[in-house]
Image: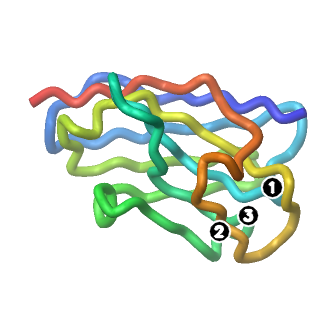
Amino acid sequence: QVQLVESGGGLVQAGGSLRVSCAASGRTVNSYAMAWFRQAPGKEREFVAAISWSGANTYYADPVKGRFTISRDNTKNTVYLQMNSLKPEDTAVYYCAADSSVSGSYYYTPLKEWQYDCWGQGTQVTVSS
């Protein structure tokens, strides 16, 4: 069983940067696609970014393209989300997720929430104007 723990959230001013991390334990996620989702108050959880196990494929939601970067360090069993040029509308709880149903597929990068079966508890990111 995989446990995912997010960290690095906090309060930042608009235009600032923040990096959130997702550390996996219990079982390696090195062969799984990983993703970040977020949920703002009063809104449904939405896709932010995803990365294949190899790192060869990455995808981003339109609102974060050019500002956010997803990456992973398989030696540390950790996935990162670097967030630059933050906006107040980026305020949300950020969740890390892993798709353990497909292992070792080089370019596999699911984008839908239902495709991910392992979730962290989330980390709050607040961007002040």
Q: Residue at x 77, y 53 (%)?
A: 75
Mark before the other along the chain sequence, 1 or 2? 1
Instruction: Tell me what residue is drawn at x 35 percent, y 39 percent.
Output: 18
Q: Is residue 96 left or right of residue 62?
A: right
Please report the residue visible at 65 percent of the width from the left and 68 percent of the height from the top: 55
* 40 on left or right of 118: left
Q: Secondary structure at mark 1?
A: loop
Residue 36: x and y in percent read 53, 46
Residue 122 at x, y percent in the picture: 54, 26
Quadrant containing the C terminus is top left
Label 1 CA crowd tier, 10 Å (few <14, some 14–19, many 20+): many
Precedes in sequence: disc 1 or disc 3: 1
Q: Image point 78% across, 30% down: which residue?
A: 3
Pick the residue in front: 62 or 5.
Answer: 62
Check if mark 2's residue and mark 3's residue have beta carbons within 8 Å: yes
Q: Is residue 30 left or right of residue 96?
A: right
Q: Amino acid at mark 1?
A: Asn
Label number found at residue 53: 3
Q: Amino acid at mark 2?
A: Gly
**Circles 1, 3 touching at the beta carbon (< 8 Å):** yes
Say if 91 sits above or below 73 in the image. above
| Inter-mark Cα distance, 1 to 3 | 6 Å
Is the residue 84 above or below the residue 31 in the image?
above
Residue tagged 2: 55
Label at residue 91 = none
Count of labels in the image: 3
**Near-viewer residue (54 or 44):** 44
* Residue at the extreme left of the image, as rendered: 129
Q: Nearer the viewer, residue 77 or 105?
A: 105
Q: Position of residue 114 (x, y in %)?
A: 67, 47
Give the labeled residue for mark 1: 30
